[in-house]
Amino acid sequence: MTTWLLFLLWDHRDGMGNLRITEKGLKLEGDSEFLKPLYAKEIRSRPGNPLCFQSARNVTVNILNEKTKVLTRLVTGPHAVEAHSQKFEVHNTVGKLLFSADDNEVVVGAERLRVLGAEGTVFPKSIETPNVRADPFKELRLESPTRSLVMEAPKGVEINAEAGNMEATCRTELKLESKDGEITLNAAKIKLPNLPLGSYSSTGSRQKIYELCVCPNGRVFLSQAGASSTCQINTSVCL
């Protein structure tokens, strides 16, 4: 009985059902289902048609060495796509590296890295980049809600707003410090609107010219200008 069934299945020399035997190998027409492992050197679709692998759970592709040890694994499951290898790379159609990741670093080779999330990007540790830029007509915000924000460069840090304002705010103290050089404020107007005002005033004078004074502890205040310096008269502001 078994011999008769096999004869019926293989009655045609070129194959059976959707399976055809050609000079280049086996050819399947339509959908096919394999209940056990399939071993092949190459699997490809008909020219112009996609190649589809479908599974009720996941599809796993393993690359083995001569000792059948898994070297690389790609798992596409219902919740995620996982790649297991020493290094993961993504290239474009001309071979340029767009993205790579290994144990030491993650490299983005594209001309621009865009983050579209409403909450921005969170870096738990340091980040190294030659340029941080917002999209046109979008604001750029560098923020550290609970810790300090440090920007360092061996040849200087440049912050430039070509078509708008630049704002730096903090809860406690904002320090501008130069160890070996100077700090230059180059602008048509420099305003310090919330400086304390000394109590000194010339007798009968209501002129609005003030002297900018600096306390020994670094505090800056205004004192109404007189014939000579009035900063010494308002030293109580420094307390």
Image (cartoon, rainbow, N blue to C red):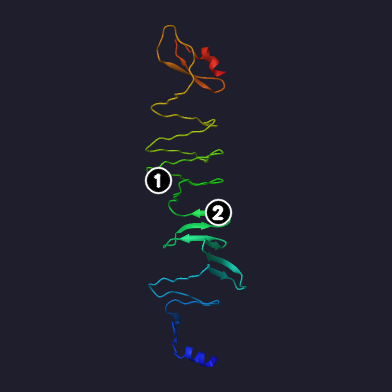
Q: Mark 2: give few (<14), some (14-19) or many (20+) Cα within 10 Å.
A: few
Q: Provide residue 83's location: percent of width, then percent of height.
A: 54, 62
Residue at 48% across, 57% down:
99
Q: Earlier in the sequence, mark 1 or mark 2?
A: 2
Q: Secondary structure at mark 1?
A: loop
Q: Nearer the viewer, residue 100 or 2?
A: 2
| Quadrant that contains the C terminus | top right
The residue that label 2 is drawn on is 105
Label 1 and label 2: CA atoms lie apart by 26 Å
Amino acid type assigned to the residue bearing label 2 in the image: Glu
Considering every residue shown, the one lying at the far top of the view is 203
Residue at 53% across, 17% down:
237
Label ID, residue 15: none
Q: Secondary structure at mark 2?
A: loop
Q: Looking at the image, how many numbered discs can be counted on the residues?
A: 2
Q: Provide residue 85's location: percent of width, then percent of height.
A: 56, 63
Amino acid type assigned to the residue bearing label 1 in the image: Asp
Considering every residue shown, the one lying at the far front of the view is 1
| Quadrant that contains the N terminus | bottom right
The answer to whether 158 is drawn above or below residue 238 in the figure is below
Mark 1 or mark 2: which is in front?
1
Residue at 39% across, 26% down:
189
The residue that label 1 is drawn on is 135
